[in-house]
Image (tube, rainbow, N blue to C red):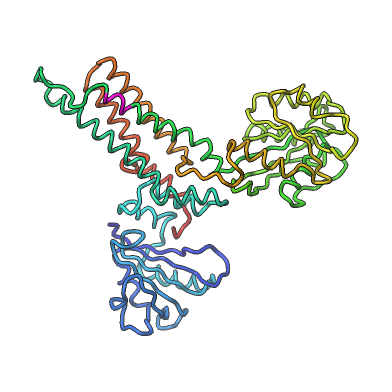
């Protein structure tokens, strides 16, 4: 248990009906007692845990606000410590005065994420669950919320715990043989074939988790979609149609967009970021346009999906072909033929013959034709063939830290299989399995350095 008692405002800045201040630590009741005047009870010690009570919050005898108060006693609280939640009116002045009163009493202002860090240190959450708290707070779509909640409720933790239990069992069998190595009749308690089969099964489990990171990252961070093309092909108009909002300025003058413009939107439950870019052409007439084109190419490199926009009312140009070449290295590129409301000089058939490896689609941003179909194409390009809005995996890896831990553990287990099959030695085999266990332990927080904890919890908001 931490010796210090901490407090922080747990609600976001701004006006609201309610504001919440959290207090946690061994002296929670002691510090609150001078400030709380209960309406129906004599003192805080008479207040039943996890029951709301009406009260006044006082400062030097002056009533600051009418509040409601809820107490949680150790270990039955979020942090595992004595914890109080003060519900006051959501005025910044009220919140500030109550917090300042508590801090002047000797309570310390909580660091970012310190309440959740204490929950982790007191065994209320493992590290993957603690990280899921931040993911849930920052979730922007239904899907990212579901994934974060699944992790917070322990679905990933349970899978990792099962894997660690199996490795501990395997390690115990190996160490039986090591402990009795002087006995020529002794050996591992588990048959070599069974041991290797168990290790291969665990490697496969870890492989599936590692591969889920690609989708998990997109759900967590958002899929980046760059719209590129030559000037005046309709990139900004397409961005406006996909957002269903006049976000970008649209004119008939080539080169209107001089810089990249980013805007997030919900793509059937998937967090997505659209990037409108400056038109790319040779011999740009001024420095500003050339700088904008450089940023366009940078956006292309950072994109998960590229929409290469072509003008269906014009023949395929050298600039179009050049951009197709520039995007050759990108895995996910969709060729979009815009302006199909005008007489056609470029057909889908011609484009598909010229670029057979790339999906293509015809639209009109002016008449809003083909936009719904394009949204579905974007969703499937991001996540595969799942029906729009129905992607609901139970467990996904959304953190690069988690992925790196899993990769390390998988490598150790693959090495252990080689060692076993080549009869290199039980001590070396045990060493690799211990390393695999340590990697999973680091992921869950069983093995965690101060630097790792500091890095994780510093990203939280104060009050959580």
Q: Residue furthest front?
A: 387
Quarter of the image that includes the C terminus: bottom left
Tell me if residue 196 is in the magenta stretch: yes
Q: Nearer the viewer, residue 136 or 94?
A: 136
Which residue is found at the position 36% from the left and 66% from the top?
107
Residue visible at 31% across and 80% down? 43
Residue visible at 84% across and 38% down in the picture: 339
In the picture, the quarter occupied by the N terminus is bottom left
Q: Nearer the viewer, residue 58 or 392?
A: 392
Residue 397 pos. (x, y %): 46, 40
Whether residue 238 is situated above or below residue 138 in the rendered picture: above
**Whether residue 291 is situated above or below residue 133 in the rendered picture:** above
- Splitting the image into 4 quarters, where does residue 326 fall? top right
Query: Does the magenta portion include 427?
Result: no
Front residue (pair 330, 393) = 393
Which portion, as a residue range, is magenta? 194-199
Residue located farthest toward the right when viewing the structure as drawn: 343
Give the prevailing secondary structure in the magenta stretch.
helix
Q: Which percent across, then down, holds residue 13?
A: 55, 64
Image coordinates for residue 222, horizontal then vertical, percent: 58, 43
């Amino acid at each position: 248990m931490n010796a210090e008692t901490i407090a922080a405002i747990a609600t976001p800045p701004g006006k609201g009906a309610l504001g919440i201040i959290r207090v946690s630590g061994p002296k929670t009741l002691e510090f609150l007692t001078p400030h709380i005047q209960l309406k129906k009870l004599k003192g805080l010690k008479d207040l039943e845990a996890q029951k709301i009570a009406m009260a006044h919050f006082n400062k030097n005898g002056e009533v600051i606000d009418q509040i409601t108060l809820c107490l949680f006693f150790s270990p039955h609280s979020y942090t595992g410590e004595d914890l109080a939640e003060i519900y006051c009116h959501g005025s910044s002045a009220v919140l500030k005065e109550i917090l300042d009163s508590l801090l002047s009493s000797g309570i310390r202002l909580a660091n970012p994420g310190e309440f959740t860090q204490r929950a982790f240190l007191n065994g209320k959450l493992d590290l993957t669950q603690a990280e899921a708290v931040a993911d849930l707070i920052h979730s922007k779509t239904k899907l990212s919320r579901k994934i974060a909640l699944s992790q917070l409720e322990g679905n990933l933790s349970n899978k990792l715990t099962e894997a660690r239990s199996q490795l501990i069992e395997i390690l115990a069998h190996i160490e039986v043989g090591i402990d009795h190595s002087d006995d020529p009749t002794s050996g591992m308690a588990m048959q070599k074939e069974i041991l290797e089969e168990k290790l291969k099964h665990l490697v496969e489990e870890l492989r599936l988790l590692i591969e889920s990171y690609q989708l998990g990252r997109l759900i967590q961070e958002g899929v980046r979609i760059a719209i590129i093309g030559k000037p005046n092909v309709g990139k900004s108009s397409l961005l406006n149609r996909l957002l269903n909002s006049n976000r970008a300025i649209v004119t008939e003058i080539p080169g209107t967009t001089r810089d990249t413009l980013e805007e997030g939107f919900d793509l059937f439950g998937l967090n997505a970021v659209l990037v409108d870019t400056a038109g790319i052409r040779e011999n740009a007439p001024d420095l500003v346009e050339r700088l904008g084109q450089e940023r366009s190419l940078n956006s292309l490199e950072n994109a998960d999906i590229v929409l290469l926009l072509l003008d269906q009312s014009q023949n395929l140009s050298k600039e179009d072909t050049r951009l197709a070449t520039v995007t050759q290295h990108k895995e996910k590129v969709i060729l979009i033929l815009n302006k199909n409301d005008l007489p056609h000089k470029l057909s889908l058939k011609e484009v598909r013959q010229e670029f057979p490896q790339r999906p293509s689609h015809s639209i009109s941003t002016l008449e809003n034709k083909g936009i719904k179909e394009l949204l579905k194409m974007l969703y499937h390009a991001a996540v595969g063939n799942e029906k729009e809005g129905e992607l609901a995996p139970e467990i996904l890896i959304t953190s690069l830290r988690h992925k790196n831990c899993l990769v390390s553990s998988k490598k150790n287990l693959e090495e252990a299989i080689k060692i076993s099959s080549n009869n290199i030695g039980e001590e070396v085999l045990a060493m690799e399995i211990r390393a695999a266990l340590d990697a999973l332990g680091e992921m869950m927080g069983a093995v965690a350095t101060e630097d790792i904890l500091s890095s994780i919890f510093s990203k939280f908001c104060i009050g959580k």
